[in-house]
Image (cartoon, rainbow, N blue to C red):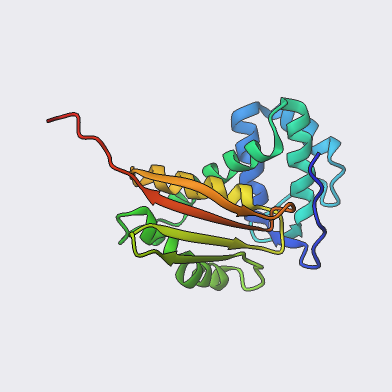
Amino acid sequence: MRHWRVSTKNFMKGIVFTEFIEMVENQFGIELTDRVITSSDLASGGAYTAVGSYDHREMLSMVTNLSKETNIPVADLSRVFGSYLFERFTSIYPQFFADIDNALDMLARIDDYIHMEVRKLYSDAELPRVLCERLPSGDMRLTYRSARPFADVADGLIRCCIKHFNEPINVTRAENTPDSTHAVFLLTRYAKWDWTL
């Protein structure tokens, strides 16, 4: 079992929790969702609002118990949730995508634009750092840093972003701390065969 480092910045916004509960209900059913919430012994009781703030360890507990119920590894569930979140964000925040037509530009604007806009909505939000470096080759090095262990969620978000824009980009996790609070991703373009010739 993965061991999570406890952070002094333990709280995150309720929208992440409400979206997680919705994803579990949609993919695994209400009965399993109820079992996960009950077995997680949550201080909040599992009653979340999008604008509330909750201890991130409640999310870790729910993901761990969902893993036990489904026999799906925690890391895989976290990546699935990251992918689900990206898809939901395209619906909830369409303004973030209005003038973007490729994945690398989208990812590059997370830290200096999207997170700034999120703070306007949730002034107390403790957000991760997402630093993007364009390489001479045209590829990208993306560094994720957070007080919370959600590098796997970031992995899912990145991969879903690439899928959303339908681009030929490989994702390689070049670095990762054991507690998943820091990871480096290399996003490398590859040739996309044109079978219409």
Residue sitting at 71 percent across and 26 percent down? 70
Q: Residue 38's spot in the image, x, y percent?
A: 84, 36
Q: Is residue 162 above or below residue 114?
A: above
Residue sitting at 69 percent across and 29 percent down? 72
Residue sticking out furthest to the left: 197
User: Of 114 and 146, which appears nearest the observer?
Assistant: 146
User: Of 68 and 99, which appears nearest the observer?
Assistant: 68
Residue sitting at 62 percent across and 64 percent down? 128
Residue sitting at 75 percent across and 62 percent down? 11
User: Of 113 and 91, which appears nearest the observer?
Assistant: 113
Among the 4 quarters of the image, the one containing residue 113: bottom left
Q: Residue 35's spot in the image, x, y percent?
A: 80, 31
Q: How many marks?
A: 0
Q: From the viewer's perspective, is 31 left or right of 142?
A: right
Q: Is residue 101 above or below residue 46?
A: below
Residue 46 showing in the rendered view: no
